[in-house]
Image (cartoon, coloured by chain):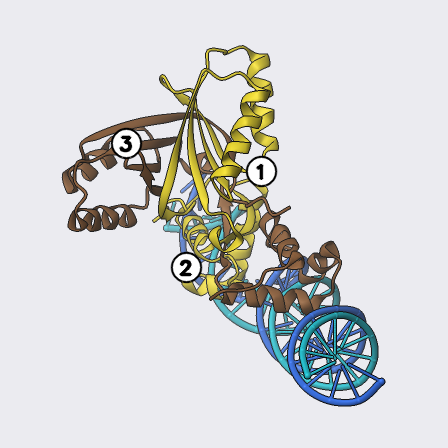
Chain colours: A brown, B yellow, C cyan, D blue
DNA sequence: TGCAAAGAAGGAAGAATGTTCTGAATGATC
DNA sequence: GATCATTCAGAACATTCTTCCTTCTTTGCA
């Protein structure tokens, strides 16, 4: 699974992060190479799992998702069985865009995207009925200042 | 700018969210339609800004980004000039993947992706030297349980 | 109900792009 | 310095995109 990633690979990934719909010729020109090596490297990076998938970024508000919450969760339960059911609940809920297990006194953080505050409450009620949590704090986003999942490869 | 989005549009967007590299024919088959209407609708959705751009999702750890922090920021300054310089600082820093202005006693939350803890400290020092902040709490992610920016269109 | 307008299906055709292949060049190893 | 393996540039082929057209269905309105 280990793979050697050189400077040209990073340039290609940088281009794909900005716009994955460009043609191989354009990308090759941008990174100062030609079509064949770019194609071979993209294939290699895909097979190695460095490139996971190719998606479109949608405008959440245009599709009716007006509310975004960051949810800080504390729990007193740390057994494997509890954790398994918690993780499964998060995976199954499409409102949960991100979930991280944290170090420190807060155990988990979630990013939850929903239509409105009522939809968040429905999500919250469903979650706490499925798994026991000790303390939940919801932070409501008023403005999305920046949103990208591009890595700084420059 | 307003656009009417029907069920077929949502199905198409759902397919594109999962895998934007599939051909029009395949997508048309998946949503139970044919090539022409699918192409027209994708074009319409792109022009309306519902589809923002097309990118690849990379494996952060494979590229050496082993640390992810959520940063909670409180500030006592709420003037426009301070806010402008703060926003500009966030936009310019590629480590900042997400930035939200919040309601409540915490003013901002950031998601910061860096190589390691030392790189985070460098980022932190640079940030507080640029803009005054009252209080900063960093939450260190131990495990990325879930990560997607797909909207629940089903 | 009937009429007009809009959109969908299906296919055809040219342009653009993806994918494979080959010979040349480059660099590493001994 | 010779040999081997790897990579690159460009050609050649295959697929897909994009546009256009015709027919048919659906939608909206009088």
Residue B146 badge: none
Label 1 belongs to which residue? B94
Rounded to the nearest angstrom, the CA distance separating label 3 from label 2 is 46 Å
Cβ atoms at labels 1 and 2 below 8 Å apart: no
Q: Quadrant of residue B70?
A: top left
Cβ atoms at labels 3 and 1 below 8 Å apart: no
Label 3 belongs to which residue? A105
Q: Which residue does the image show at 16% across and 42% down from the upper left?
A: A130
Residue B34's spot in the image, x, y percent? 48, 63
In the image, which is nearer the foreground, mark 1 or mark 2?
Answer: 1
Whether discs 1 and 2 lie on one chain: the answer is yes
In the image, which is nearer the foreground, mark 3 or mark 1?
Answer: 3
Residue C22's spot in the image, x, y percent? 74, 86
Query: B139 or A142: which is nearer to us?
Result: B139
Q: Which residue does the image show at 31% across and 34% down from the upper left?
A: A104
Determine if residue B2 is in view: no
Rounded to the nearest angstrom, the CA distance separating label 1 from label 2 is 37 Å
């Amino acid at each position: 699974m280990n793979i050697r990633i050189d400077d040209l690979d990073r340039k290609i990934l940088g281009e794909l992060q900005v716009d994955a719909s460009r043609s191989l010729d354009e990308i090759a020109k941008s990174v100062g190479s030609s079509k064949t090596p770019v194609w071979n490297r993209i294939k290699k990076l895909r097979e190695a799992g460095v490139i996971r998938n190719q998606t479109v970024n949608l405008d959440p508000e245009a599709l009716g998702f007006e509310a975004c919450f960051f949810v800080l969760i504390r729990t007193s339960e740390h057994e494997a069985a509890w954790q398994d059911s918690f993780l499964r609940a998060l995976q199954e809920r499409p409102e949960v865009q991100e979930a991280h297990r944290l170090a420190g006194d807060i155990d988990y953080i979630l990013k939850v995207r929903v239509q409105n505050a009522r939809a968040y409450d429905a999500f919250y009620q469903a979650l706490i009925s499925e798994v026991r949590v000790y303390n939940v704090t919801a932070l409501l986003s008023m403005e999305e200042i920046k949103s990208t999942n591009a890595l700084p490869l420059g």
